[in-house]
Amino acid sequence: EESADQNTLSIELTPIKSMSAAEFADALKTYAPELRANVYNLSEEDGTPVVKTFTANGAKATATIDVSNATGVYFEIADGSKAGLAYVQWHEDNDYYTWDYYSREIPAFQDVQKTDWFYGYVQRAYENELLKGKEEGKFCPNDNMTYAEAITLGTRMHANFNWATSPDEMTADGPWYQKYVNYATENGIPCDYPDMNAKITREDFVHIFYACVPTSEPINNVPDGSIGDVPMTNEHAAEIYEFYRTGVLAGSDSAHNFKPKDNIKRSEVAAIACRLLMDYDLVQFDMQ
């Protein structure tokens, strides 16, 4: 609803059915909903990201954002698992306000629960047609990704970012991944590996994805040589460090070690894809 002063936009959550105020308060603690908004003005190149938590007041919860001088706002309500619950686009068109409501659901993967840290990433990767289920009714989040699968995902992201025809729609003779290799070859994406069905290393994964989507502006202080297991002599050091600096990667432990020779899980891949393609939930830290 629009507030009386026309400078703020307030979103209100109310309990469903016969839920009491106490039950509603407990639900808010459990799901920790947030209002994630991008407020923009058509005269500006980028919008201003805003994240607000909902504040409970009895049987209602409200979050308010400043929309002064805005010509539009895209926002979503996300729960504590970072999963989008509702997406709304508002824009000003000849003094008329138009609201478009839509929600998205991922399939009922037996091995992906809302309490899993990767749920929101899997949801976004699936709804953007980047990652699909690996088996009937399963996402297989703990499976390691292969070189063929990494190239497949990377080329999908490249096509998505560049508004190009997806390699999914192409045909090619040979193994199932040949059309993705062809797309990669045509677009300068690394794809020359001796065993495409082998499990990909984390450093080779970064090398492929670095060529697929441009990284955003740095948000982290990560000096050269500060990643303990990635010396600057590493063949892909520059790419790995850029992923750290832009919040796409944060390492595998409290010391931010990268473990370049280890394999990478599909759950981790979903997170990286969302951060890289959509700047979603970038990780902020300082390694000074």
Image: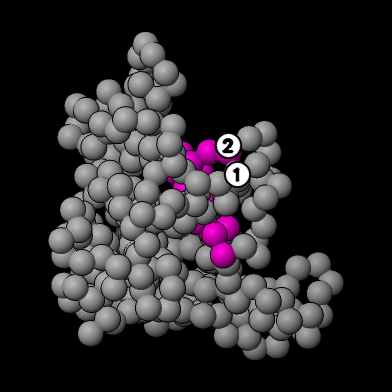
Which residue is at 33% across, 48% downward? 205
Assign the C terminus to one quadrant of the image. Answer: bottom left
Q: Which of the pair 188/165 is nearer the observer?
A: 188
121 within the magenta span: yes
Q: Kindly check if marks 2 and 1 are in contact, taking CB atoms under 8 A apart as contact.
A: yes
User: At 49% across and 76% down in the image, what residue appears?
Assistant: 10
Callout 1 environment at 10 Å: few (<14), some (14 to 19), or many (20+)?
many
Residue 114, picture quadrant: bottom right
Q: Examine the rendered structure and indicate whether residue 282 appears above or below residue 123.
A: below
- Whichever of labels 2 and 1 marks the residue nearer the N terminus, that label is 2
Q: Label 2's element?
A: loop
Residue farthest along the right direction in this orientation: 18
Q: How many marks?
A: 2
Q: Position of residue 189 (x, y in %)?
A: 22, 37
Residue 162: % across, % down: 24, 39
Looking at the rendered structure, the kind of residue marked 2 is Lys
Q: Is residue 176 magenta?
A: no
Query: Which numbered tag is attached to residue 134?
Result: 2
Above or below, 1 relative to 101: below
Residue tagged by mark 1? 139
The one nearer the camera, 20 or 80, is: 80
In magenta, the rendered stretch is: 117-133
- Residue 215: % across, % down: 23, 57
On the question of residue 208 being in view, the answer is: yes
Distance Cα–Cα, label 2 vs label 1: 5 Å
Kindly indicate the quadrant of the structure image that contains residue 9.
Answer: bottom left
